Image (cartoon, rainbow, N blue to C red):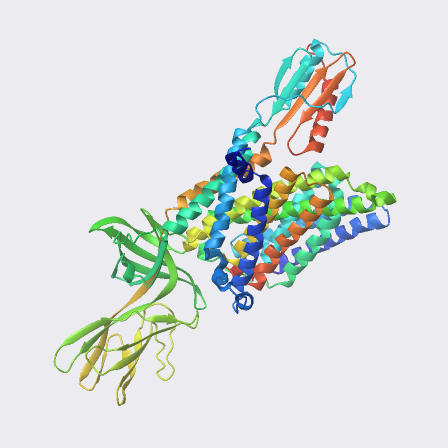
Amino acid sequence: MKGEILLHWLAVTGYSLSAVAFIYSLVFKKRTFKAGMVLAAAGFLFHTAALGLRWYNTGHGPYMRVYEVYSSDVWIAVLIYLVIQFAKPKLRIFGLFVMPSAVLLIGMAIMASKEIRQLPETFRTFWLILHIFFAKIAYGSLLIAAVAGVLYLLKARYDTRNLEWLNKIPKLDYLDELNYKFTGFGFFNLTVMIAAGSIWANQAWGSYWSWDPVETWSLITWFIYAIYLHLRRMHGWKGAKAAWFSVTAFAVLVFTLLGVGLIYISNHSPYIS
Amino acid sequence: MSLGKKIWQFATSPSLALKLIAVVTIVTIFGVLIKVDKTFTFVRMVNSVPFTEKLGLQNVFDTRWYMFLVFLIFINTVACTVKQALNRKKTWTAFTPVIQFKAAVDEEFMDKAARVLRRKRYRVAVEGKTVKAEKNMLGYGSSVVFHTGIIIIIAGAFLSVGLRMSGRFPLFIGGTFTDMHKGYYSINEGPLFGEKHGQFELELNGFEMISQGKGKIQSMESLVTVSKDNRILARGKTNFSVPLKVGNFTFYQFNLFGYAPTLVVDNPDGLKNSYVLIMNTIGSPPNYRFIYDFVVPNTPFQVSAELFPDYNGIAGKPATRSWEIRNPVLKLMVKDNEGTVFSGILPASGSVSFAGYKVSMPQVRYWSSFNVVNDRGLSVIYAGFFVLSLGAAMIYLYVPQKIQFIGTDDGVNVGGWSPRYKVALTDELNEVISAILKERSPGH
């Protein structure tokens, strides 16, 4: 357990320094962006080791209780970010939002109870793995979409002032399309996540849909992203309007992921409490 | 415009779809907020306004008006999907050129362009001085597939709501449950289920509790035999993660268990009666209690019984060491109209006597409880999930794209079309042009 906590703290250190490097680069116009990337990658390696050790210690994947759930959510988000920036270096700027979010969430994870909870028998199913896998990919993608939205709004707001740091942000139409692409990808993953979760619930409890709070809020989130996609596709919404919508939708997603399970008793309480 | 056309236009309007999704979203948010508000403060507030109490706000999701909203979405989705399927663009359209560059438009150029585009997985057609290329055409049908998935799911959900039956019943080892409406401890039936009972008998052959230590139970597993008209349909195990499916019925191990001691009462007149007590399990682990209160028929006695399956032997403060039946004892209190006639411990191997009666407990068995579900809509919903996921994957993976090169005397005009990603298309056009310009002629 001690090794796992130490590795988690090393990951936090890497992510925190990476966030500082990104902010420093932007505010003081220093070339610390690459250092930020290296630190994020180093933190990710420690994080991977920490989760691997946790998996070994618990005998199940990192999806029971706040500590494991939040930590693995951060892991996926950082992984998606690292892959994206590797494929498209001009998107490194996304780290400015992804890394501080990662630090915040992993901090919440580390502060939570680290007691090992055995996997309930109903959780030992392929459908649960599928449900969690697609959930994490969906959250990571929609985070990136929201970051694209925030960057769009920042660039659009201050573009006329000819600020140097704005040059590091990709062009508006590119950000807008990125927001659309990642929302589409996130929506696909949300769809499969809800379907797999429903099949799992039926297998475990004999009911594919029970209007459980987390279940219902996931459906609401799905509806909201469906509205976003319809607005873009059918009504030509793009630019600032779409960016605002995306950021708001992500706030609902965060509430569904972090808020609902903590506030209400639900079928998801055993893993989130 | 005819009325039919007007209705068709209204039903297929994308803005109607958007409005309906928005309304359902808002109502669902209210519904879930009310559902978790155990004090129903909001419901009481709204119900104080005349005519609103019939809205059924305590459970919005079970109301007819919520179902009607979902039905409207269903109709709108069907109409829009049919329209989309009919309007699939099959013909080639000319695109407004977005890029122009200088190049000698000869056969060699056309050949290079075709090669580059084919390498990028485009289907290419060369017509004179025009190169037409398209890829991911499967994506044209993706939205239709996705929305068909939604239609199937909603249809399945309606079937499920109408035809579903779910019930719960307890059963002790060796006992048989017959599927009769009144036999269930609790039962829910859809309005169209039609009381089609008498479909199975279930016998509990064995029961096992899997402990995870500290008085906590990891799982429960039952061995059951399902039969109909004395013909065995299936024999197998069911536990928390594996239900048993037999025909249209699925049997689930429910997480409630208890004990069923057999009490034998020898009456003073020589008659012998035996009773199987399916004891109530109250509390939560590790503080379970197993109790049963009953009036013994044809006697003045009222019995309060509590079972300790693995008695620790402390008479003053009885407790159990585990949930396994190892050393079962029954703590008995017998009262008649005048007061307590007996209070004490009845061990499994012994008997107790009072007022001429002798009570013994020859057997203690487990009882287990089961949920049984008969849901005709489920397979339809699952099929819908599959189609929906397939459609969502197609939408993302197959973004249709078309590129057109038109050779002119001044050079080449390049245009293209993509339903969603215009910037990506422009990047692709630039990439293709650059690749064509770098492409060597065959033989070089």
Question: What is the quadrant of residue A184 in the picture?
Answer: top right
Asked whether A3 or B40 is in front, the reply is B40
- Which residue is outermost to the front? B2
Vertical arrangement, residue B374 with respect to residue B97, above or below: below
Asked whether B99 or A163 is in front, the reply is B99
Vertical arrangement, residue A85 with respect to residue A68, above or below: above
- Which residue is outermost to the bottom? B338
In x, y percent, where is residue B281? 37, 70
Res B364 seen here? yes
Res B388 seen here? no
In x, y percent, where is residue A5? 64, 59
At 24% from the left and 51% from the top, the residue drawn is B227
At 66% from the left and 16% from the top, the residue drawn is B131
Asked whether B177 or B235 is in front, the reply is B177
- Which residue is outermost to the left? B270
Disc tally is: 0
In x, y percent, where is residue B171? 29, 62
In the image: residue B417, left or right of residue B138? right
Q: Quadrant of the C terminus of chain B?
A: top right
In x, y percent, where is residue A217? 56, 54
Question: What is the quadrant of residue A191 in the picture?
Answer: top right
